[in-house]
Image: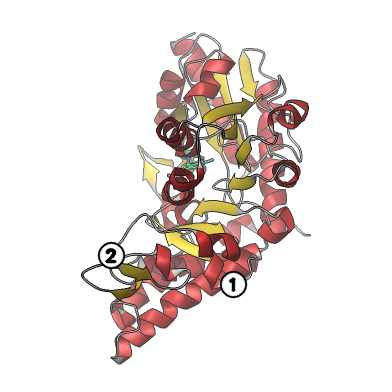
């Protein structure tokens, strides 16, 4: 596929023209959140200006328009990840809420002392803390697939850990710290061989590469709108329909019920059963527009762009003898981000120097504290790329290291 036209894409992001202290912003914090193109902003503004109403099939025209827009957004997301239909697409607040929905609706009901939850050492706190706490409440145990010295999962260890006591395997598709692209189909197959479920955290995958949940055969899959050129306040939990049918909701209210009496209630059909109260309607319109916008570029072209940029950044940083990089070398095993440390300079100091050059990167543990403990570092600096980033911006990042060396090293 031919390369994407970055300059044309940048025209749709006025924020990228912003300057601080006379320097144009270099936005390299996309794993935290991506910027929002004009068509997505316009779609949400138009909704508020012209179609705003509450959903759940009100009688009046505006409510019917809003309900249609909200429901069709589910269809569009289902198509985007190759799910069977809107029944398998639950809109949440974000990836974190999707993981909690699964842990509360399924985990609390199904896990017990004889069960094991298998995670990986590179899990984000959104799944690691969630499963850790649900396991404590149910008596289940938690085991972690080892990350090897290259930053990849030790799949021999995975095959050892995943056995007939395993109730669920929960794994990140692309690590937000290492950039590692995990073999999620293989992990899912291992889970299924032992009658376990598979949950995949796709927060750093759906925005950046083609994802086909049917091909992966994951039972559940979660991601966020704000990491894929969409708005904050909306995420998606995908689940196989037959599994979702058997789950009870853990959040109750209007819109999710079929019948309510003073004695008891029955639940509405999918996906509304898991969407109580007034949902993120404008955000769903924005997410729909973001999916259209991304697909117009092409997810395979986005994947190639990010892989090449991350490989370029990896090579440039690798050439600096006082830089330590975490995760696999540039290529198909690394998504669009690079975390690293500059010898003798704390990540927070380096990141503030970067900010002096109006370069936006992230310092910290990226919500993967156990992984940083394993790496033996308190924090790292992370540059993460998207469709509007360029090699020139990577060069600026590398050039700014000298300032940090003079000041801190
Ligand atoms: C792999 C992974 N899994 C879950 C989440 C949570 O996404 P939410 O939309 O915040 O719920 C994130 C978001 N990681 C941000 C905030 S720590 C980062 O800077 O890396 C993630 O990267």
Q: Residue at x 42, y 70 (%)?
A: 272
Q: Residue at x 36, y 70 (%)?
A: 266
Give the label on residue 253, or none: 2
- The coloring applied to the image is secondary structure
Residue 49 image-quadrant placement? bottom left
Q: Position of residue 32 (x, y in %)?
A: 46, 42
The Cα–Cα distance between marks 2 and 1, rounded to whole angstroms, is: 24 Å
Would residue 291 be found to the left or right of residue 281 on screen?
right
- Nearer-the-camera pick, 144 or 343: 144
- Nearer-the-camera pick, 157 or 356: 157
Ligand 1 near label 2 (Cβ, under 8 Å)? no
Q: Answer with mark 2 or mark 1, whichever residue precedes in sequence.
A: 1
Would residue 377 be found to the left or right of residue 93 on screen?
right
Measured along the vertical axis of the image, is residue 156 above or below residue 302?
above
Q: Position of residue 72 (x, y in %)?
A: 49, 77
Measured along the vertical axis of the image, is residue 161 above or below residue 297?
above
Residue at disc 2, secondary structure: loop
**What residue does disc 1 label?**
85
Q: Position of residue 356 (x, y in %)?
A: 40, 29
């Amino acid at each position: 596929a031919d390369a994407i036209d970055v300059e044309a894409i940048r025209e749709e992001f006025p924020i990228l023209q912003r300057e601080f202290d006379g320097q144009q912003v270099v936005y390299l914090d996309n794993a935290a959140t991506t910027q929002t193109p004009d068509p997505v902003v316009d779609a949400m503004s138009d909704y508020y200006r012209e179609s705003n109403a509450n959903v759940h099939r009100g009688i009046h025209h505006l409510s019917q328009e809003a309900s249609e827009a909200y429901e069709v957004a589910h269809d569009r997301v289902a198509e985007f990840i190759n799910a069977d239909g809107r029944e398998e697409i639950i809109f949440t607040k974000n990836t974190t809420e999707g993981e909690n929905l699964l842990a509360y609706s399924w985990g609390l009901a199904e896990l017990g002392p004889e069960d094991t939850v298998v995670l990986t050492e590179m899990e984000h706190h959104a799944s690691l803390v969630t499963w850790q706490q649900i396991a404590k409440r149910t008596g289940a145990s938690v085991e972690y697939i080892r990350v090897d010295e290259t930053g990849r999962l030790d799949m021999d260890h995975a095959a050892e850990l995943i056995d007939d006591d395993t109730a669920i395997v929960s794994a990140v598709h692309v690590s937000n710290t290492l950039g590692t692209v995990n073999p999620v189909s293989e992990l899912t197959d291992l889970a299924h061989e032992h009658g376990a479920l598979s949950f995949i955290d796709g927060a750093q995958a759906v925005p950046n590469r083609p994802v086909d949940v049917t091909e992966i055969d994951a039972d559940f899959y979660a991601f966020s709108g704000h990491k894929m050129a969409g708005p904050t306040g909306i995420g998606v939990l995908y689940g196989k329909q037959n599994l979702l049918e058997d789950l009870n909701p853990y959040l109750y209210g209007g819109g999710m019920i079929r019948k309510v009496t003073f004695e008891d209630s029955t639940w509405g059909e999918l996906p509304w059963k898991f969407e109580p109260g007034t949902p993120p309607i404008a955000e769903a319109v924005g997410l729909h527009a973001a999916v259209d916008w991304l697909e117009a570029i092409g997810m395979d072209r986005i994947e190639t762009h990010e892989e090449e940029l991350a490989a370029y950044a990896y090579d440039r940083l690798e050439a600096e003898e006082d830089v330590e990089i975490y995760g696999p070398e540039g290529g198909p095993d690394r998504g669009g981000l690079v975390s690293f440390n500059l010898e003798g300079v704390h990540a927070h100091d380096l990141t503030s120097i970067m900010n002096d050059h109006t370069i936006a990167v992230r310092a910290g543990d990226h919500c993967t504290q156990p992984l940083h403990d394993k790496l033996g570092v308190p924090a790292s600096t992370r540059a993460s790329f998207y469709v509007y980033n360029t090699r020139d911006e990577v060069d600026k990042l590398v050039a700014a290291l000298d300032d940090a060396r003079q000041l801190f090293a």
